[in-house]
Image (spheres, grey):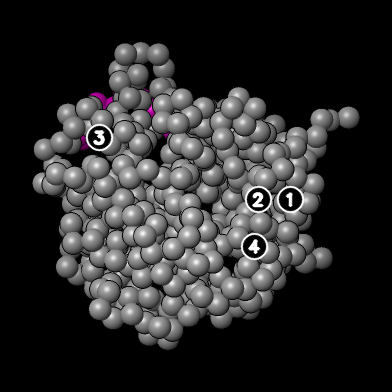
Amino acid sequence: MTDFISFPTDFTWGVASSAYQVEGAWNEDGKGPSIWDTFSHHPGKTYHGDTGDVAIDHYHRWKEDIQVMKSLGLKTYRFSISWSRILPDGLPSHINQQGLDFYNRLVDELLANSIQPLPTLFHYDLPQALQDQGGFSLRETACRFGDYAGIVARKLGDRVSKWLTINEPMVFAANGHLSGEHAPGLKDIQVAISVVHYQLLGHGLAVQAIRSAAGCPISVGIALNLTSIVPASSSQEDLEAARIIDCMQNRATLDPIFLGKYPDDLMGLVGLLLPPMEQGDLKIISTPIDFLGINYYSRAVIKSEPGVPFIELAPIRPQGSSYSQMWEIYPRGIYDLLIRLHCDYHPPQILVTENGMPVADDLDFDVKVRDVRGIQYMQDHLIQVRNAIDAGVPVTGYLVWSLMDNFEWAFGYRMRFGLVYVDLDNLQRVVKMSGEWYRRVISGNGFSPKTFYIEPDL
Ligand code: FCB
């Protein structure tokens, strides 16, 4: 008999999504365009030219979708609010009431079904009008984000007790402004670095604005894409390469938020490219938060690679590991990361705001989706989360990315991360085997580990 892995009684189980990836209705009811509308409409930017124009039509099917959540027994639903649905041109002078009403109804319906709403205020989809002025490379955009946060919190703060400001500021900066794979599609290191700083400033301003607007005790955090970094060998060069990536991917956001300063080695690398800082910026950025959200998918194994411009390093794919369509599968990494965060930064609470894997699944003849690799992935990561809790890390919950298959940015609809399959022809929802498994985990507050998937021995 295998031991039952149980979780603390107040542990929250949920799922995550984001506005552009699920809502559709890109130009309905007064919504202004976002940079993702512009980017995806540009030929060649996404797989197959896919767009989020309709996405999975959550904007119209939200009630039905909440019933799916209820059937799974979810305790928390993390979604994001589309800034340009609320403020079509990004500015507080023009509020689109229909946009606010949508999220207002969504929150009421979630609560009526005993699901805690967890909104993220910014998940990559900046209003195009703000991008036209320079987007998050400007200080003004950080201030506009603070205004927007206050407007939303004044409307929903009487019922929403937990908030996330920004999703993955590093990914937004790097993929959108350095590699150009994401909106707005820029390739400019100086802009990318400004975008990191001003998002963090916007985060701090938003924490303050949400707290003062809510009018009741609330909990505010940020969702960071963090990972455990491993050198490819014990050579001095690889150790150095791993330190640089840790600095850029983890400490560049953690240090200013928790320690009120940028890491010295980051300043050495890119300090000259930072935008002019004003006195008080770092104090605002380090406004204490109530919890840290972590999005964990994989580790990064790094080796020195002198040919690579500027950073002189590269990630490698370790042999013998198993992989999803996107990344190495490395459950132990979430344990290492949680322990490290607890020791180095002591966040009061940690919530796993995203974890999951894409599975190339489809409906079988009996209209079932047997995505056993996805179950194995969640189970193996949850065991590591449980181990971290045992070691004293205050992990308060786990949210699967994602509730339903959806628009996976530049990959379009090719990657299926959902617990619920979405038929892209008719948008019908079918709970996958992983969804059924998750339902049982939630109702039992744990599981007995099983082997769902063994890598074929070729
Ligand atoms: C994260 C994003 C989320 C989704 C998952 C797979 O980095 O926050 O929107 O794309 O990856």
338 on left or right of 184: right
Q: Residue at x 47, y 65 (%)?
A: 157
Q: What amino acid is at disc 2?
A: Trp
Residue at the disc numbered 1: 442
Question: Residue 105 is drawn in which quadrant?
Answer: bottom right
Residue at the disc numbered 4: 115
Q: Secondary structure at mark 3?
A: loop
Residue at the disc numbered 3: 261
The image shows residue 383 at horizontal and vertical percentages of 67, 34
Q: Do the CB atoms of the residues marked 3 and 2 lie less than 8 Å apart?
A: no
Q: Residue at x 48, y 80 (%)?
A: 101
The image shows residue 348 at horizontal and vertical percentages of 48, 37
Q: Residue at x 77, y 41 (%)?
A: 447
Q: What amino acid is at disc 3?
A: Lys
Residue 14 visible in this rendered orientation of the protein: yes
Tell me how many marks there are.
4
Q: What amino acid is at disc 4?
A: Ile
81 on left or right of 240: right
Q: Residue at x 28, y 81 (%)?
A: 94
Q: Nearer the viewer, mark 2 or mark 4?
A: 4
- Picture layout, residue 107 above or below residue 256: below
Residue at the disc numbered 2: 13
Q: Do the CB atoms of the residues marked 3 and 1 lie less than 8 Å apart?
A: no
Q: Do the CB atoms of the residues marked 2 and 4 lie less than 8 Å apart?
A: no
69 within the magenta span: no
Q: Between marks 3 and 2, how big is the CA–CA gap? A: 33 Å
Q: Secondary structure at mark 1?
A: helix
Q: Which residues are magenta?
A: 300-312
Q: Between marks 3 and 1, how big is the CA–CA gap? A: 39 Å
Comes first in the chain, label 3 or label 4: 4
Q: Nearer the viewer, residue 184 or 392?
A: 392
Q: Between marks 3 and 4, how big is the CA–CA gap? A: 37 Å
